[in-house]
Amino acid sequence: MNRRSLMLAAAAVGAALATPAFAQQRDQNVLNRLLNAFATTEVGADTFVQQAAYGDQYEIQSSRILLNGSQHPNIRQFAETMIQHHTMTTNELLALPEGSTRVAAGLDQRRSRKLQELQMTQGDMLNRLYVQQQIQSHEESELLYQTYAESGDVPVLKAFAQRHLPMIRQHLQMARALQAPDTTGSNR
């Protein structure tokens, strides 16, 4: 799939996401298509930077929502780490001339909808939804970073992906551990 085809597919996905029905299934379908696209083609610099920036902003904003609505100490600690780490990677990416010129403003529709879903959720369900979304987001980021780290077309951005891929993988492990049964007796 060439870059033009990938961009057309992304535009079609964006248009399909505009309707409110079946949002959860549609998000999973979109994620699967993105993951397949990342796995089967080279990711260009524009796609990498845009998706990395979307991912960072989503991580920061979703973690702030969690901190405003959750008292679970382990999940709150994870959210604080996400804010710190993803703010750092955003700042680093924006400091690169090769990165700053490719960053889109705001979030894509899929991630915006996920934030809205989090904002409308409370208590234990907020904790569970947040962790579920973190796993999904970091799985997507892991594949994006790995693909670009292996076949990136801009050396500075490729080095950025290589440098931060271990952190993305660590975040994914941390999120998966939060999904495990809570043996401390505290409520998620």
Image: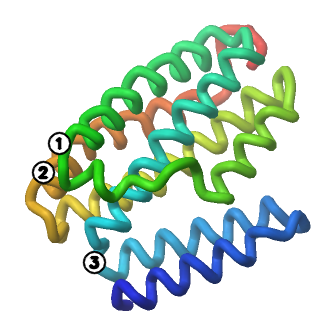
The residue that label 3 is drawn on is 42
Residue 171, percent from left and from top: 42, 34
The residue that label 2 is drawn on is 159
The residue that label 1 is drawn on is 163
User: Residue 143, which numbered label?
Assistant: none
Q: Is residue 151 left or right of residue 41?
A: left
Q: CA distance from mark 3 to mark 2?
A: 16 Å
Q: Secondary structure at mark 2?
A: helix
**Which quarter of the image is occupied by the N terminus?**
bottom left
Q: Residues within 10 Å of mark 3 (few under 14, many from 20)?
A: many
Task: For the residues labelled 2 and 1, say whether their Cβ atoms are less than 8 Å apart.
Answer: yes
Give the mark, 3 or 2, whose residue is nearer the N terminus. 3
Q: Secondary structure at mark 3?
A: loop
Q: Secondary structure at mark 1?
A: helix
Residue 109, percent from left and from top: 67, 59
Q: CA distance from mark 3 to mark 1?
A: 19 Å
User: Which three-letter amino acid code belongs to the residue tagged 1?
Assistant: Arg
